[in-house]
Amino acid sequence: RSKYTSRHLNRPVVVVSSEVNPWSKTGGLAMVAGSYGYEFAMRGHRTMVVSPRYAAYDGAHYIGYTKVWLDGREHEVQFFHLYQDLGDGNGTDYIFVGHDCFMRGGLYCDPHTGKEYLDNLFRFSLLTVAALEAPLILNIRGHTFGQDVLFIANDWQTGLLPVYHLYKYRRNNTYKNSRCVFVIHNIG
Protein backbone atom coordinates (compact mmCIF):
# COMPACT_ATOMS: atom_id res chain seq x y z
CA ARG A 1 0.00 0.00 0.00
CA SER A 2 1.31 3.43 -0.99
CA LYS A 3 2.15 5.92 1.73
CA TYR A 4 1.27 8.89 -0.49
CA THR A 5 -1.55 10.05 -2.69
CA SER A 6 -0.86 10.58 -6.38
CA ARG A 7 -1.46 14.05 -7.81
CA HIS A 8 -1.82 15.43 -11.32
CA LEU A 9 -3.45 12.25 -12.55
CA ASN A 10 -4.56 14.06 -15.70
CA ARG A 11 -0.89 14.26 -16.76
CA PRO A 12 0.16 11.14 -18.71
CA VAL A 13 3.62 9.73 -17.99
CA VAL A 14 5.95 8.62 -20.81
CA VAL A 15 8.92 6.55 -19.67
CA VAL A 16 11.75 6.26 -22.22
CA SER A 17 14.43 3.63 -21.73
CA SER A 18 16.86 1.61 -23.84
CA GLU A 19 15.68 -1.53 -22.08
CA VAL A 20 12.58 -2.64 -20.20
CA ASN A 21 11.92 -5.82 -18.27
CA PRO A 22 10.88 -8.47 -19.31
CA TRP A 23 11.49 -7.78 -23.02
CA SER A 24 15.05 -6.48 -22.96
CA LYS A 25 17.37 -6.58 -19.98
CA THR A 26 21.06 -6.29 -19.26
CA GLY A 27 20.74 -5.08 -15.68
CA GLY A 28 18.94 -2.83 -13.25
CA LEU A 29 17.87 -0.21 -15.80
CA ALA A 30 15.35 -2.62 -17.32
CA MET A 31 13.97 -3.43 -13.87
CA VAL A 32 13.55 0.24 -13.00
CA ALA A 33 11.88 1.08 -16.34
CA GLY A 34 9.50 -1.83 -15.92
CA SER A 35 8.74 -0.71 -12.36
CA TYR A 36 7.98 2.84 -13.53
CA GLY A 37 5.51 1.42 -16.02
CA TYR A 38 3.79 -0.51 -13.26
CA GLU A 39 3.88 2.06 -10.46
CA PHE A 40 2.66 5.10 -12.38
CA ALA A 41 -0.19 3.11 -13.93
CA MET A 42 -1.23 1.60 -10.61
CA ARG A 43 -1.41 5.08 -9.11
CA GLY A 44 -3.82 6.18 -11.81
CA HIS A 45 -1.65 7.81 -14.48
CA ARG A 46 -2.08 6.98 -18.12
CA THR A 47 1.34 5.44 -18.72
CA MET A 48 3.43 4.73 -21.80
CA VAL A 49 6.85 3.05 -21.80
CA VAL A 50 8.93 3.49 -24.97
CA SER A 51 11.88 1.22 -25.74
CA PRO A 52 13.61 -0.22 -28.81
CA ARG A 53 12.21 -3.31 -30.50
CA TYR A 54 15.24 -5.60 -30.33
CA ALA A 55 13.20 -8.65 -31.36
CA ALA A 56 9.67 -9.64 -32.36
CA TYR A 57 7.92 -9.58 -28.97
CA ASP A 58 4.90 -11.83 -28.42
CA GLY A 59 1.69 -9.81 -28.22
CA ALA A 60 3.16 -6.58 -29.61
CA HIS A 61 1.36 -5.50 -32.78
CA TYR A 62 2.14 -2.84 -35.37
CA ILE A 63 0.35 0.40 -34.55
CA GLY A 64 1.92 2.97 -36.88
CA TYR A 65 5.02 4.65 -38.19
CA THR A 66 6.60 8.05 -38.64
CA LYS A 67 9.52 9.57 -40.48
CA VAL A 68 12.10 11.53 -38.53
CA TRP A 69 15.04 13.64 -39.61
CA LEU A 70 18.32 12.60 -37.99
CA ASP A 71 21.96 12.44 -39.01
CA GLY A 72 21.36 14.42 -42.20
CA ARG A 73 18.57 12.23 -43.62
CA GLU A 74 15.09 10.92 -43.12
CA HIS A 75 14.49 7.62 -41.29
CA GLU A 76 11.27 5.65 -40.97
CA VAL A 77 10.55 4.15 -37.59
CA GLN A 78 7.73 1.75 -36.84
CA PHE A 79 5.81 1.51 -33.60
CA PHE A 80 4.62 -1.74 -32.02
CA HIS A 81 2.14 -1.68 -29.15
CA LEU A 82 1.48 -4.03 -26.26
CA TYR A 83 -1.03 -3.20 -23.53
CA GLN A 84 -0.47 -4.70 -20.11
CA ASP A 85 -3.73 -4.76 -18.14
CA LEU A 86 -2.98 -4.36 -14.43
CA GLY A 87 -6.60 -4.62 -13.26
CA ASP A 88 -9.06 -2.12 -11.78
CA GLY A 89 -8.93 -0.04 -14.97
CA ASN A 90 -5.15 0.46 -14.73
CA GLY A 91 -2.65 -0.56 -17.36
CA THR A 92 0.50 0.37 -19.24
CA ASP A 93 0.98 0.95 -22.96
CA TYR A 94 4.35 -0.43 -24.06
CA ILE A 95 5.60 1.05 -27.33
CA PHE A 96 8.52 -0.64 -29.07
CA VAL A 97 10.35 1.42 -31.69
CA GLY A 98 11.19 -0.64 -34.75
CA HIS A 99 14.17 0.10 -37.00
CA ASP A 100 16.87 -2.10 -38.53
CA CYS A 101 19.51 -0.58 -36.23
CA PHE A 102 17.89 -2.24 -33.20
CA MET A 103 17.47 -5.75 -34.62
CA ARG A 104 20.87 -7.16 -33.71
CA GLY A 105 22.20 -9.85 -31.43
CA GLY A 106 22.93 -7.55 -28.47
CA LEU A 107 21.47 -4.42 -26.97
CA TYR A 108 24.63 -2.31 -26.80
CA CYS A 109 27.48 -4.58 -27.90
CA ASP A 110 28.16 -7.11 -30.62
CA PRO A 111 27.86 -10.49 -28.86
CA HIS A 112 30.55 -11.99 -31.12
CA THR A 113 33.23 -9.36 -30.51
CA GLY A 114 32.13 -7.89 -27.18
CA LYS A 115 32.65 -4.39 -28.59
CA GLU A 116 30.11 -1.59 -28.52
CA TYR A 117 28.20 -0.93 -31.69
CA LEU A 118 29.83 2.01 -33.42
CA ASP A 119 26.46 3.58 -34.20
CA ASN A 120 25.07 3.58 -30.65
CA LEU A 121 24.82 7.37 -30.65
CA PHE A 122 22.64 7.21 -33.77
CA ARG A 123 20.57 4.30 -32.46
CA PHE A 124 19.64 5.94 -29.18
CA SER A 125 19.17 9.38 -30.73
CA LEU A 126 16.66 7.71 -33.05
CA LEU A 127 14.94 6.11 -30.05
CA THR A 128 14.76 9.52 -28.37
CA VAL A 129 13.22 11.34 -31.33
CA ALA A 130 10.77 8.48 -31.94
CA ALA A 131 9.77 8.57 -28.26
CA LEU A 132 9.03 12.29 -28.54
CA GLU A 133 6.83 11.63 -31.58
CA ALA A 134 4.89 8.69 -30.10
CA PRO A 135 2.60 10.62 -27.69
CA LEU A 136 1.68 13.05 -30.47
CA ILE A 137 0.81 10.61 -33.25
CA LEU A 138 -0.14 7.19 -31.88
CA ASN A 139 -3.86 6.64 -31.50
CA ILE A 140 -4.08 4.23 -28.59
CA ARG A 141 -7.54 3.16 -27.49
CA GLY A 142 -9.20 6.07 -29.25
CA HIS A 143 -6.84 8.98 -28.63
CA THR A 144 -3.24 10.09 -28.38
CA PHE A 145 -1.40 10.83 -25.16
CA GLY A 146 -1.11 14.43 -26.40
CA GLN A 147 1.31 17.22 -25.61
CA ASP A 148 0.79 17.70 -21.88
CA VAL A 149 2.86 14.75 -20.68
CA LEU A 150 5.69 14.08 -18.26
CA PHE A 151 8.70 12.44 -19.91
CA ILE A 152 11.02 10.33 -17.77
CA ALA A 153 14.27 9.82 -19.70
CA ASN A 154 16.51 7.08 -18.33
CA ASP A 155 20.29 6.98 -18.46
CA TRP A 156 22.80 8.03 -21.11
CA GLN A 157 20.91 6.38 -23.98
CA THR A 158 18.09 8.93 -23.64
CA GLY A 159 20.30 11.82 -22.54
CA LEU A 160 19.36 13.88 -25.59
CA LEU A 161 15.64 13.75 -24.80
CA PRO A 162 15.65 16.96 -22.70
CA VAL A 163 17.65 18.70 -25.43
CA TYR A 164 15.33 17.65 -28.28
CA HIS A 165 12.34 18.38 -26.02
CA LEU A 166 13.43 22.00 -25.67
CA TYR A 167 15.13 22.82 -28.96
CA LYS A 168 13.19 20.76 -31.48
CA TYR A 169 9.72 20.71 -29.94
CA ARG A 170 9.10 23.42 -27.34
CA ARG A 171 10.72 26.13 -29.46
CA ASN A 172 8.27 25.15 -32.20
CA ASN A 173 5.24 25.42 -29.88
CA THR A 174 4.94 21.70 -29.21
CA TYR A 175 5.07 20.24 -25.70
CA LYS A 176 4.77 23.75 -24.23
CA ASN A 177 3.18 22.47 -21.00
CA SER A 178 5.06 19.18 -20.79
CA ARG A 179 7.90 18.39 -18.45
CA CYS A 180 10.97 16.20 -18.66
CA VAL A 181 12.87 14.43 -15.89
CA PHE A 182 16.28 12.91 -16.66
CA VAL A 183 17.23 10.00 -14.38
CA ILE A 184 20.84 8.81 -14.12
CA HIS A 185 21.28 5.23 -12.91
CA ASN A 186 24.47 4.04 -11.21
CA ILE A 187 26.39 7.30 -11.41
CA GLY A 188 29.94 7.05 -10.25
Image (cartoon, rainbow, N blue to C red):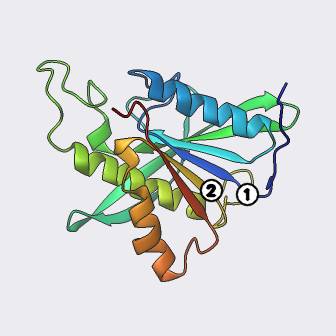
Is residue 63 visible in the rendered image? The answer is yes
Badge 1 or badge 2: first in the primary sequence = 1
Residue 132 versus residue 99: which sits nearer the camera?
A: 132
Q: Residue at x 40, y 58 (%)?
A: 129
Task: Assign the C terminus to one quadrant of the image.
Answer: top left
Q: Position of residue 20 (x, y in %)?
A: 50, 30
Which residue in the structure is indicated by mark 1?
11
| For residue 188, side relative to residue 185 (left or right) | left
Q: Position of residue 157 (x, y in %)?
A: 35, 43
Residue 51 versus residue 152: which sits nearer the camera?
A: 152
Q: What distance separates the C-alpha of mark 1 from that of mark 2?
A: 7 Å
The answer to whether 148 is drawn above or below residue 57 in the figure is: below
Is residue 57 visible in the rendered image? The answer is no
Amino acid tagged 1? Arg
The answer to whether 56 is drawn above or below residue 155 in the figure is: above
Q: Residues within 10 Å of mark 2 (few under 14, many from 20)?
A: some
SS assignment at label 2: strand
Task: Assign the N terminus to one quadrant of the image.
Answer: top right
Mark 1 vs 2: CB contact within 8 A:
yes
| For residue 26, side relative to residue 153 (left or right) | left
Q: Residues within 10 Å of mark 1 (few under 14, many from 20)?
A: some
Q: Residue at x 37, y 51 (%)?
A: 159
Q: Position of residue 17 (x, y in %)?
A: 46, 40
Which residue in the structure is indicated by mark 2?
150
SS assignment at label 1: loop
Amino acid tagged 2? Leu
Q: Which of the 4 quarters of the picture holds residue 47?
A: top right
